[in-house]
Amino acid sequence: MYKVTGPPIPALKTETVKAFTAQSEIVFVSVGSEVEQATKDLADKYLDTIYIASAADASLLPGVTPPKKLPAVVALNSNAEGTDNYAQWYEGGSEHTLEEFVLAHQLPPMVALERKNFWQIANAGKLVLLAIVDPGGDSHKEFLATAAKVARRNVYDVRSGWLDGVEWEKYVKELFLVTAEQVQTGAAVIYDAPNKQFYANGLPTTEAELQALIDDTLAKKIPPTNTERGVQKAAKRVFVQFAEFLEENPWAMVILVLPLVGLGYLAFRVSGDTGAEDDPDKTK
């Protein structure tokens, strides 16, 4: 809505604020009499991926409680409009930098994952708390509400989203070993897309169990499970890992080539000796 093309940051005007919504994006609004240089720098740096605007005060933003101190930045999430989670504030003195705040909140927590955004969120540089549910079932709303609460609390550590386990039944069964029965209850894993692996710890359903899944994964207390199945996929994975090893360690090529050179030389000598015995001219 207010996509930045470069400084200065677009300002919200009183006469247009009634139409202001976050739409389908996370929108960052800098609130205060003056926009900090750090906000301008971020707007310029991430102009292709985030929306940043400025407002003189929070009263220009409907449904947003003013911050305790200014200047501040608020992340508005359209998926949570009308709830306490619609606006997430960043104020001075936070243990995180403003850039860390922006990167942590640039994607909505526990969003519905489909073809168009699954790859984006799964490969956004963090592990993903992946909830797998039956959206037509009775328990999915309660499960997703609990998962979303945990996801919001851990926005600096993991991404999050939920997947329709009925529509993608074969996919979740093959990759994450989640059965149709577990989908009805609601299942959750931590997905590491770049490394094609996931972390699972039983069938977490409560807030404490979901938090333990995140904590134990980050602490490396849970061993990863490979998402690729079958002999061919396993062989492919080994080959790729071996190729990456050689790329990072070119000196290993020498060790591998030397035995081949030796075998080639030996075969040549044996072939030469056999040829001399069979050639009448060379035995005279």
Image: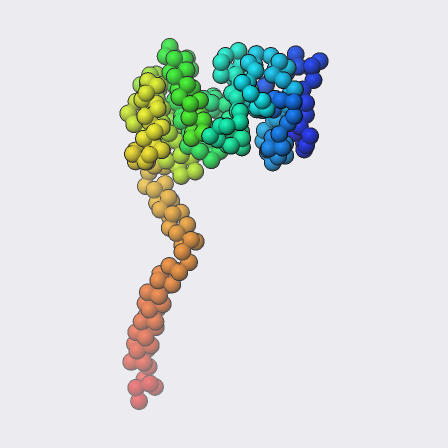
Apparent side of residue 272 relative to residue 115 in the rendered image (left or right): left
| Rendered residue at 52%/16% (across/down) | 86
Task: State which quarter of the image contains the N terminus.
Answer: top right
- Front residue of 66 and 258: 66
Task: State which quarter of the image contains the C terminus.
Answer: bottom left
- In this rendering, is residue 37 above or below 246? above
Residue projecting furthest to the bottom: 284
Apparent side of residue 274 relative to residue 43 in the rendered image (left or right): left
- Front residue of 210 and 93: 93
- In this rendering, is residue 14 above or below 251? above
Say if residue 273 shows up in the picture. yes
* Image quadrant assignment for residue 134: top left
- In this rendering, is residue 35 above or below 139? below
| Rendered residue at 30%/74% (across/down) | 270
- In this rendering, is residue 29 above or below 193? above
- Front residue of 47 and 195: 47
| Rendered residue at 35%/46% (across/down) | 238
| Rendered residue at 42%/19% (across/down) | 148
- Front residue of 85 and 182: 85
* Image quadrant assignment for residue 69: top right
Where residue 282 appears, as percent x and y from the top left, is 33, 85
Where residue 3 appears, as percent x and y from the top left, is 64, 27
